[in-house]
Image: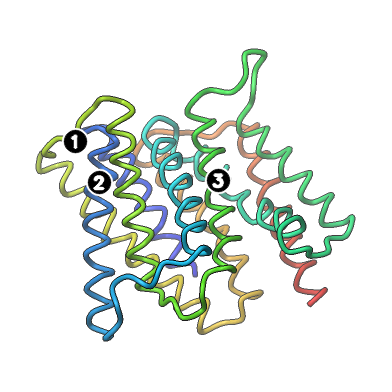
Amino acid sequence: MVLAMACFAVEDACVKSAAAIVPPSTVMIGFGLTAMAVFAALALIRGERVLPPLSRGLAVRAGFELAGRLFYSLALAFSGLGVTSAILQATPLVVVSGAVWVFGERVGWRRWTAIGLGLIGVLMVLRPSASGVTLSALFALLGMIGFAGRDLATRAAPPTVTNAQLGVLGMGVLFLAGVVVAAVSGQMPVVPPVAAVGRILGAALFGVSAYAALTAAMRMGEVSVVTPFRYTRLVFALGLAWMLFGEVPDAMMLAGSVLIVGSGLFTLARGRRMV
């Protein structure tokens, strides 16, 4: 799980770095096509269908993933890596609260308190002013909500869908997100220079590696044990943000990040006790 989170952080850094050279739509399309080809090859090697039969659950999941990847990629392009990653850590809190309304799960007052504190942490990272939040921060927030919806919708996906097939769908959605950005912004995709190609390929390589490591962690270990290590992604992201982009988090952002991570860990711990 720690290896997966490190690879995800490097993937994000590659996406952000590539978006400084070419339009974000070009990064999304190149990243999506490359990683989709890798997952398709893995499915064929395993004797699986490249795409699973479409179902309502998969369609809903794809819609949320489209929103998540679209807005998260835009946030990486226009906002700081550290800020974007910190907001993403609130995803489990939104998933827990969403499960109450979607699946009727019971959440006690302690976990509701932790969720509230975690959302306060998100506000501390976002730092809204009298004029609202910045567009880049809003992108990060919408991306986090999209990923939370995707995680909830995953429960409704048929259990016969393999990890490689989900990877093909996810990367296909990222490609589609790039097409949407190109159409809305009017910035058509361009042929990236060598420097950008290297970063896009790096994002795809580390993204696929992260997905493989994440799958192995969830299959080999107890979910309740390995899941808390997802928060190491923020540590790697803050380190890369400082080393590569010169981002130095201030006290408010660090305090908000601690609230988000602490609330998430407490929520996971309480959920484990109640199982």
The vertical placement of 132 against 3, above or below, is above
Furthest residue toward top: 131
The reply to whether callout 3 and callout 2 are in contact (CB within 8 Å) is: no
Q: Which mark is residue 29?
A: 2
Q: Circle 1 sits on which residue? A: 189
Q: Nearer the viewer, mark 1 or mark 3?
A: 1
Q: Is residue 154 left or right of residue 71?
A: right
Quarter of the image for the C terminus: give it.
Answer: bottom right
Q: Amino acid at mark 1?
A: Pro
Q: Circle 3 sits on which residue? A: 144
Instruction: Name the element at disc 1.
Output: loop
The reply to whether callout 2 and callout 1 are in contact (CB within 8 Å) is: yes
Q: Earlier in the sequence, mark 3 or mark 2?
A: 2
Residue shown at 42%/39% (left/top)?
A: 242
The reply to whether callout 1 and callout 3 are in contact (CB within 8 Å) is: no
The vertical placement of 107 against 94, above or below, is below
Q: Position of residue 33 (x, y in %)?
A: 23, 55
Q: Nearer the viewer, residue 24 or 216?
A: 24
